[in-house]
Amino acid sequence: MNGHMILTVGTPASGKSTYAREHRDLLGALGETVEIVERDMIREELTGTRQNFDREIEVTRIAQRRVH
């Protein structure tokens, strides 16, 4: 499977997720399949909150698996 990865990095609430969703929609209109992997969402799945950073190693491993 071929594809592209766009990694966004920035301060909290700087628009990273908004940027990702907008580009997912643009690429989707061109027939591309896009999956957004958000560390905040993984963190919330594991801990019940986006603010608990106690399991970051596990969050990273899950994010890596979802990308591959």
Image (cartoon, grey):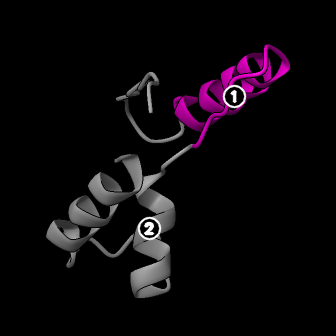
- Establish if 37 lies above or below 60: above
- Tell whether position 25 is magenta: yes
Mark 1 or mark 2: whose residue is earlier in sequence? 1
Label 1, on which residue?
Answer: 24
Q: Tell me the amino acid under the disc marked 1.
A: Arg
On screen, residue 34 versus residue 40, left or right, reads right
Q: Residue at x 69, y 28 (%)?
A: 24
On screen, residue 48 versus residue 51, left or right, reads right
- Establish if 48 lies above or below 3: below
Q: Nearer the viewer, residue 61 or 39?
A: 61
- Range covered by the magenta-colored residues: 14-35
Label 2, on which residue?
Answer: 42
Q: Residue at x 23, y 59 (%)?
A: 60
- Establish if 68 lies above or below 59: above
On screen, residue 7 versus residue 41, left or right, reads left
- Tell whether position 15 is magenta: yes
Residue placed farthest to the front in the image?
A: 1
Q: Tell me the amino acid under the disc marked 2.
A: Ile
CB contact under 8 Å: marks 1 and 2: no
The span from disc 1 to disc 2 (Cα, nearest Å) is 19 Å
Q: Quadrant of residue 55?
A: bottom left
Q: Residue at x 44, y 25 (%)?
A: 2
- Establish if 67 lies above or below 6: below
* Label 1 crowd (10 A; few <14 / some 14-19 / many >=20): some
Q: Nearer the viewer, residue 41 or 51?
A: 41
Tag count in the figure? 2
